[in-house]
Image (tube, grey):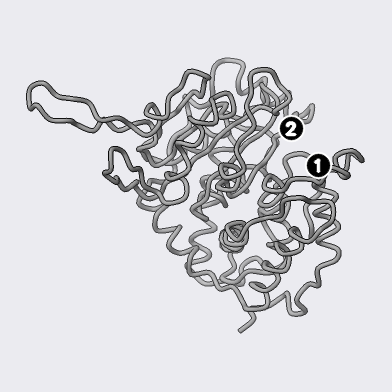
Amino acid sequence: MATSSGRGSGRAATRGGARGSGTAQAREIAASGARIAHAVESVIEGKADEVQLAVAVLLAEGHLLVEDVPGVGKTMLAKALARAIDCSVRRVQFTPDLLPSDVTGVSVYNQNTREFEFKPGAIFANIVVGDEINRASPKTQSALLECMEERQVTVDGITYELDTPFMVIATQNPIEMEGTYPLPEAQRDRFTARIALGYPSPEAELAMIDTHGAGSPLDYLEPVTDDLEVAKLIAGVRQIHVADAVRGYAVDLVTATRQHPDLRLGASPRATLHLLRAGRAVAALDERDYVLPDDLQALVEPVLAHRLLLSADAQIARRPVTAVLADILAAVPVPAATTRRMA
């Protein structure tokens, strides 16, 4: 089932019809993921799908971009997910005067030893929360490129490995807002998925008033897992089976974005990898040890939309990227066997 064109679509969470058909390992991943999601949902009201997608990105070894207007809980979602895991967390407030060395670290001369010592930057953590990433200059934004793709930092010719798990959760305001810079294409392509929270429903907003009225619920959020368990879950997600037909379907979907007349920039091969990795995580969170085409369909919008650039004619016609992706989902043939593990 394809994602809806509404904001913050995160229907990649579950495929209920096949639940419970996986191995004990898949059930363990699903149980741990449910604990993390429940903890985050105690802070973020009425956004279960978006929270589930954030957990899936974590288990897929990916990075998450949360884009929306101020005040809808972008940073709260990032901080809640980080606090639900007992691991190292660093927060970076991106501003126009932020330097790349503030992110990656810098070598400082020690007068006592008469040697240069490396002072790690904010990127050296399991979860890095980048708040308002598009308020920093493109030069500073690019400091994250090596970190996000290769999970390492090179400073003064020396390479430093980052710990596992490692996840960047970045928030950004819409680029039409004052004082923002658009993310470079290479930067956007390194984010596994992009979500938008949107405004809460009246019921959720009333519940938020009750839970947030006396203080921040983050103060009461206790970790439900740790970095070692998350690393184990990530290793388990890597073992989820993807049939050849489903692999081919992922390639066909991404290839179609490169050939569509309304797009001047299609998705990259990295997008194909991210689509399949996220599909594995979604399947495991649904207690399955195999990926269905439905999983990929539900992930197409959050995983691909932020990587695509519309053609000039499509922009003039005000055609949204979501409509183009809907065309692609309707046009690309779906593998026949979708309800059982395919050898």
- Per the image, the residue denoted by label 1 is 6
Which of the 4 image quadrants contains residue 208?
top right
Residue farthest to the right?
317
Residue at horizontal 62%, vertical 32%? 44
Residue at the image position 81 percent from the left and 48 percent from the top: 322
The tally of labels here is 2
Mark 1 belongs to which amino acid?
Answer: Gly
The front one of 22 and 64 is 64
The percent coordinates of residue 292 (x first, y second) are: 68, 69
In this picture, residue 2 sits left or right of residue 174: right
Q: Residue 303: horizontal and vertical position, in percent? A: 66, 51
Q: Quick one: SS at disc 2?
A: loop
Callout 2 amino acid: Gly
> Which corner quadrant of the image does residue 49 belong to?
top right
Asked if the residue at tag 2 contacts the one at tag 1, i.e. Cβ–Cβ closer than 8 Å, the answer is yes
Question: Where residue 160 sits in the image (x, y, percent)?
Answer: 29, 45
Q: Which residue is mark 2?
A: 198
Q: Residue furthest top?
A: 214
**Does label 1 or label 2 sit earlier along the sequence?**
1
